[in-house]
Image (cartoon, rainbow, N blue to C red):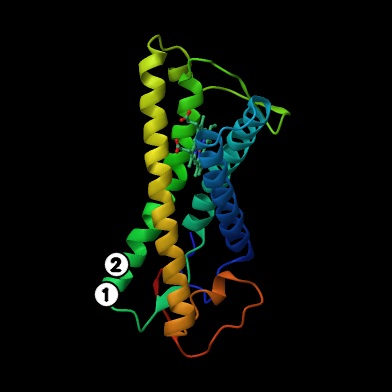
Amino acid sequence: MNEGNPPSRYTLVAIVLHWALAAGIVALIVMGMAMTKLDLPILFKFKVYQLHKSIGITVLLLAVLRLGWRIWHPAPALPATMSRNERLLAHAGHWVLYLLQFAVPLLGWAVVSAAVLNIPTLLYGVVPWPHLPLLSTIANRAQVEPALATTHALMAYGLVLIVVGHVAAALRHHLVLKDDVLARMIPGLRQRPGKDEPAASG
Ligand code: HEM
């Protein structure tokens, strides 16, 4: 683990993982809503489900990489101008985001593993992906599948709320507080001098 002072920017790997996960999550929310709420032609609906599963498992794998990277590469410090409560809120929001990045795809994987129809998952039409071992053998699928699907949906919409709060906070930092917080996650966006202190990790 890196023991020195926190860096002033995120690493390129952290930036790429952040935006890949953001894009994946937005795509999954749109797809998830479309495939469960719209009256789509059956073959198209099947394809959207398969793509949703593929991107969802990709998000899960990227979340593992991201957490591993984050453990060994501390985040830049939060701006010195933030109050104690704002820092606490920021840290809590980030850890809930991490938690949901794992919980939501794991629950999606659980749904397909316990599904009554028991449809195999072939990631991007190529890579066979197993069902979760404990769930693939259960007998009462008709009760378990809807319970898991509801939990997956509730947590996914919880993730939407947290993401909206996260985006609003990032925009507030950039447009109102005019500090570095958004710039250090966007390559090429100029950092503003003098607003951050390299002391506490964020
Ligand atoms: C961050 C990752 C994910 C997000 C944000 C997400 C989001 C969503 C959303 C918004 C829905 C619609 C919920 C509703 O209104 O009923 C949904 C449904 C669904 N998702 Fe995901 N999903 C993710 C990962 C996965 C994964 C990894 C799988 C499977 C491998 C999966 C399988 C499903 C299935 C099968 C449904 C339909 C459930 C039903 O029949 O009601 N999802 N997802």
Please give the residue where the numbered disc 2 appears in the rendered image.
88
Q: Quadrant of the C terminus?
A: bottom left
Instruction: Classify mark 2: residues with Cα within 10 Å, few (<14), some (14-19) or many (20+).
Output: few
> Residue at horizontal 58%, vertical 18%?
119
Left or right: where does residue 148 sit relative to residue 46?
Answer: left
The amino acid at mark 2 is: Leu
Element on which disc 1 rests:
helix
Seen in the picture, residue 133 relative to 75 is either above or below; the reply is above
User: Is residue 9 in view?
Assistant: no
User: Left or right of 113: which side holds 128?
Assistant: right
Residue furthest left in the image:
85
Task: Name the residue: 44% across, 19% down.
Answer: 135
Q: Is residue 107 above or below residue 174?
A: above
Picture mark count: 2
* Outermost residue to the bottom: 194
Q: Is residue 11 above or below residue 102?
A: below
- Quadrant of the rendered structure where residue 141 is? top left
Q: Position of residue 124 (x, y in %)?
A: 70, 34
Which x, y percent locates residue 60? 53, 41
Side of 52 relative to 176 (left or right) = right
Q: Amino acid at mark 1?
A: Arg
User: Label 1 vs label 2: CA separation?
Assistant: 6 Å
Q: Kindly indicate the quadrant of the structure image that contains residue 85.
A: bottom left
Front-most of 181 and 198?
181
Question: Foreground: 158 or 35?
Answer: 35
Answer few, some or many: residues within 10 Å of disc 1's Cα (few below 14, many 20 plus, some between 14 and 19): few
Q: Determine whether, in the image, residue 85 is placed left or right of residue 159.
A: left
Q: Give x and y (percent) for residue 82.
A: 34, 79
Q: Residue at x 50, y 80 (%)?
A: 180
* Residue receiving disc 1: 84
Q: Which residue is pictured at 61% across the width and 54% down the height? A: 20
